[in-house]
Image: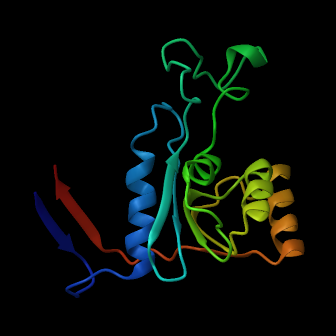
Amino acid sequence: MAVKMTGKRSDYITWDEYFMGVAQLSALRSKDPNTQVGSCIVSKAHKILSMGYNGFPIGCSDDDFPWAREGDTLNTKYPFVTHSELNAILNYRGGSLEGATLYVSLFPCNECAKAIIQSGISTVVYDSDKYASSDMTIASKRMFDAAGVRYYQYQRTGRKVEVDL
């Protein structure tokens, strides 16, 4: 495997760069043709606890369920897709997520915000907030604020990392 870094001069990447990179790499596993989202849950000791990406539940074939964004509800992806944040929470088998940090490529929806709060995750680091003005994102932020979940947008460094697989 060959790795090449360009941009800011340094021999290593920061924790935020590392974990957001893992979240973005996880997103590439999603078969969603419109929005690929990835998540990475990290302990206070900087250990990866779990990862997830948006897709259909186990046993629900990508070929048998719709990926459409518009149309009759049952012919769209919305009632069937599990979001990356919920997948990462459900994929974790190690006990409590109390105090963990969630890195996610897209700001969490209100349903994922509920799961994040209930799981004990204390910090959310997100990349894109493209739905910031939507009711669902506003509801997420309101719940995070009320529950004391810290959230902040990932600050891109301009560094490029190329990995040949």
Q: Can residue 122 be seen in this view?
A: yes
- Give residue 49's position: percent from left, percent from top: 49, 64
Quick one: 90 or 34, which is closer to the camera?
90
Residue drawn where x is 14% and y is 65% of the image:
3
| Res 6 quadrant in image | bottom left
Quick one: 63 or 68, which is closer to the camera?
63
| Res 16 quadrant in image | bottom left
- Give residue 35's position: percent from left, percent from top: 54, 40
Q: Quadrant of the N terminus?
A: bottom left
Residue drawn where x is 61% and y is 21% of the image:
68
| 109 left or right, relative to 153 | right
Residue drawn where x is 75% and y is 55% of the image:
115
Label total for image: 0
| 109 left or right, relative to 31 | right
| 75 left or right, relative to 36 | right
Residue, far bottom:
10
Residue drawn where x is 50% and y is 58% of the image:
50
